[in-house]
Image: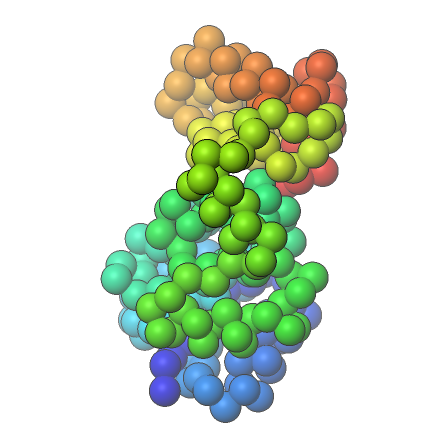
Amino acid sequence: MKSVYILDDHDIVRFGLETLISASGKFRLLGSSSNLADGMVQISALQPDIVISDMSMDDSKGLDTVKAVVEAQGDRYVLVVSMHDEMLYGEQVLSLGARGYVMKESAHATVVPATLEIAEGRTWVSPSLRERLLSRLRGGADQRSPEGSSDAVLTQREIQVMERLGRGKNTKQIASELDLSVRTVDIYRANLKRKLGLRTAAQLIAFSLSRT
């Protein structure tokens, strides 16, 4: 029986995930944590087979959280369960080493099947995200999207810039946090506007706020 540890800073969500995993009778629940720092200590000590983790914790946000959890797990598995749009984040989460991505809105029905799939060494994504990934392999993905769409293919750096815009950071602050030049951040901002079909900086910030 594979062991599972859960990371989520919302008590109700964490309790719901614990209940789903325990009630399935398929896994051994080792525990849970509401913040990344404590979770890292427990993951190191308990070495769970699978960590089910949110992307946004009180002490860490977005792809930075995913990187930390994947690094702590090493060769073991990570399933991300998030409220964030899978079309924006799913592909990047997988590229960082997570084995699956589940939207919280469907977690009640999918988190157990997803965890079972990952426990067998396979990858779990929704049918729509799977089709998008297959489309990209076939060369059919379009890098541009209608205004406000989440269908654009964004790089990890672009998502990191977008996350920080959504947290109210300005260009200089983002450059400092990501160890980039201001000019490079401006290029990423321009790329985000182009890929997302947005015309102004205000639209980009509004979009970033809605997605982070």
Quadrant of residue 14 in the image?
Answer: bottom right
Residue 19 in the image, given as x and y percentages of width and height: 60, 82
* x and y percentages locating residue 56 in the rendered image: 56, 50
Reply above or below: 3 against 95.
below
Q: Which residue is situated farthest in the bottom direction here?
A: 25
Tell me which residue sits at (44%, 14%) in the image: 184
Residue at 54 percent of width and 50 percent of height: 131
Q: Residue at x 61, y 18 (%)?
A: 194
Depth order, front residue of 57/54: 54
Where does the C terminus fall, quadrant-wise?
A: top right
| Residue 62 left/right relative to 211 | left
Query: Residue 40: horizontal and vertical position, in percent?
Result: 37, 60
Q: Is residue 103 above or below residue 59?
A: below
Q: Residue 206 location, x and y as percent? A: 73, 28
Locate residue 88 relative to residue 118 in the image: left or right.
Answer: right
In the picture provided, is 10 more to the left or to the right than 175? right
Rendered-image quadrant of the N terminus: bottom left
Q: Is residue 193 visible?
A: yes
Regarding residue 170, the answer to whether it shows in the image is no
